[in-house]
Amino acid sequence: MVELIDIRKRFGDLIALDGVTARFAPGRVHGLLGENGAGKSTLMNVCYGLLKPDTGQIRANGAALSPRSPRDAIAAGIGMVHQHFMLAGAMTVLDNVLLGDRRAGRVLDRRASAARLRELAERLGWPIDPAARIETLSVGQQQRIEILKALWRDVQLLILDEPTAVLTPPEVEQLFGAISRLRDEGRGIVFISHKLGEIRRICDELTVLRRGRVEWHGGATNVSPDELTRHMVGRSVEAISRAAPGATRADASPAALTLDHVGANGLHDVSLGIDPGEILGIAGVDGNGQQELAEAVVGLRRIERGRITLGGADVSHLPPKARLALGVAHVPNDRKREALVPTMSVRENVALKRHDVAPLSRGGLLSPRAAARIARDLVARFDVRTPSIETPVGALSGGNQQKVVLARELAMSEPRLIVVMNPVRGLDVAATQFVYRQLLDRRAAGSAILLISTELDELLALCDRVGVLYGGRLTMTGFPTTGRDEIGRLMAGLDARGAA
Amino acid sequence: MTEVAAALHGRDRPSGPVGRLVAPAVFVASIALCLAAAALVLALLPSPQGEHHTISESLAIIGKSVWERVLLPRSPRVRAGYRNWIQTLQTATPILLTGLAITAAFRANVLNIGTQGQYVLGAIAGAAAGIYLPAGRGMLIPLLLLAAMAAGALLAAISAALERWRNVPVVLSTLLLNFVALEFLRYVLQGPMRAAHEDGTLLDPQTRELPDAARLPDFLTQSNGQGLHVGFLIAVVAAVALSFLLRRTTFGFRLRVVGQNPDAARFAGINVARVSFATLALSGALAGLAGAIQVAGIPPYVLFPDVGTDGLGFTGIAVALLGRLSPVGVIFSALFFGLLNTAFRALEQSPLQIHSVAAQAVQGMLIIAVLVVSSPEWGRILRPWRPRGGVKRG
């Protein structure tokens, strides 16, 4: 029995875990559900010794445990298989299993170890070759090696972080078979997933996390997918004052953006259209094609099929710069990596995308004075809290960094289309409200907005229409006439009626 | 590897009036400390003549020689006028240019460590242009300098092309092309460019002298006929130009953005591959220029095989790092290296007769010490004294 009692964890302003209590019993498969950022991974990283909780207690079989590294956790019988495997590709299966195993001693007895490993694998119904090199194995086989690695160390609780995300349906069946066998051996399993169908099939009990708290806990059999969805995405819509509908538009004016059967790496046959003054929301769990969609629209990702138009003009194969000139603004997902140069000043970051056009430069020469004037103006208008425009943007808080990005993207010209991805991730309430106000103002001014977000509340509050990306495919919903439950089901890979 | 420039350079520029002063002040102090330590090491070395000097005597001799033969513009005893300083500035010239070559590349996070090869190729191209082009006085020098820059840029462009179309890391291809350039130098000096006597017998592997029209003119010429060639001025102008390029041009802006955050550069619509390509060519051109200036600036105006092994291209890396990848900083660090060089020559002739091998060893240790002191780690330790830019949590 592993118990997590009243665990709290803050990252700066962000409360990732707000007093979470969970008990993982032997011989049970415990499903852990929640949206992105609900705290699932943080909780499991605390359990596995990768993060230290601010307060709270971890107990293993009644004894208090404060794992300071995975090594401590493993010694206490807790193992974890991450979504991204931690294997050395050029080494053999046996080497990977023995790697870091202290009991192996200084001299390895490979033959005995190989025999033991083969026996262990066969018990799970997975014949393996201990001498095979990892890089020659399929993803599903590599996952088995990860699980074997944990079992080799005789863990009593095995945490599986979205184990089915990378598997084909037959591999999922084999994984479930192994999980059942481990349960029958009396081991505990924590199964993290977004896929409700799977969760209900394999789990004995469920815990739903939402915004760092336990939203619901109970047996897996007496709960419907609808109820689970509701627990995951919540009911309350925060009051975001919605502006009047967008600027009236003449019916003759072309759509601001259309995608016509667009296919690219990570996107399958995506079609959509956004009118001026409209916000189209794209919901979905991270990694289902959101980044790819944003990159395809702004020109950073080559499309293999289909057509993209901006204001009626075909831009399918124009580079980012040309689309920028046509009025495409972009607030990317990862502001520190994709939107800003943290070591450079606020002034230079404001100038970043238009440094080579007037008034910021003439004839290849920069005009720092014009850049300073514009930066000062934007800092005042967007209330960026910075000691000066020469301060490196990396020294500002997350909210102020995002204000710099928004100022650059929204206020330096009249954008025809704004592509925004997770714009308030990691921001506090005030900064969040500010971002929403800016987006609604642009909508009122006639910009089309493509808002890609994992936060369903945000989408429902801001968008005129909502589509869902799952596995690189886009499904438009009937929102606003159909509601959150249907969207939640689509995000979980079910069809709109709730079937798997 | 992607963040080498960022790690080396810390941030793009220190902020605040105090920040601007603290770093150089600490820097100068540490160099002074290193020099004092080096002097102490030299003083402890036994004299080859077996004469015994106490440490304080040795230190006095070192101080006196360095003062009279290196720092003093007009020594009453040496009677060489500006000679010491001419020596220093002449030595500083090629490493200033190769240092600038490294600076340009590293600021864009392009790891060009082929400046030695680009420098060699520049020397070959410069010598060839000077010897074989028929152009008259006035045109020949600009032509040979341009030829050298083109040759250096071309060699660097090979690496850029290999990275862009064949995914070969620049750091590898530039390193390996150094050897190609060195062997090419040996080949041209054995074969096509080897000079012969009047009677047709061959000289040692070297070219014939560059014609007068191809020799860089001197200024500050002394009574003994020695002067400082204009290559020094060209190098200083190149430093100022590079500084201007980085600070004030759109290309320089793109170069810095690519160096600091290539992802953000891509998301801002900057063609990262094109910027890296152009940067590498620029870097190669600067290194090539250094090669031509060595051949056309220094008597006897002949291309020798030792150009291939003098290491001045590699020294550029140390010079650039010591100058903290700032073109103006590189001027000072090249001068510092030049001073060290003349200082050790002076010590060789001093009563201590410190052998040039010992001198080189001390020089190497000194460089390492200075680099350690000027590393970003020290910057981090010093940071509490700098004004922190940033009101948190807005």
Image: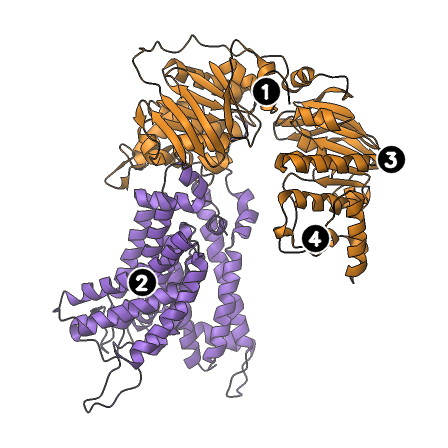
Chain colours: A orange, B purple
Residue positioned most to the front = A170
Whether discs 3 and 1 lie on one chain: the answer is yes
Residue positioned most to the right = A62
Identified by mark 4, the residue type is Val
Disc 2 target residue: B152
As drawn, the label of residue B349 is none
Task: State the image coordinates of residue A328 (x, y, percent, origin top left).
Answer: 36, 27
Between tags 2 and 1, which lies in front?
1
Secondary element type, mark 1: loop
Task: State the image coordinates of residue A274 (x, y, percent, origin top left).
Answer: 40, 19
Q: Nearer the viewer, residue A160 or B285?
A: A160
**Label 1 CA crowd tier, 10 Å (few <14, some 14–19, many 20+):** some
Identified by mark 1, the residue type is Asp
Q: Chain of mark 4?
A: A
Disc 3 target residue: A61
Nearest to N terminus: mark 4 or mark 3? 3
**Residue B91 seen anywhere in this rendered image of the structure:** yes
Tell me the distance, in whole angstroms, between the alpha carbons under discs 4 and 3: 31 Å
**Label 3 CA crowd tier, 10 Å (few <14, some 14–19, many 20+):** few
Whether discs 3 and 2 lie on one chain: the answer is no
Secondary element type, mark 2: helix
Task: State the image coordinates of residue A65 (x, y, percent, origin top left).
Answer: 81, 38
Identified by mark 2, the residue type is Gly
Tell me the distance, in whole angstroms, between the alpha carbons under discs 3 and 2: 69 Å
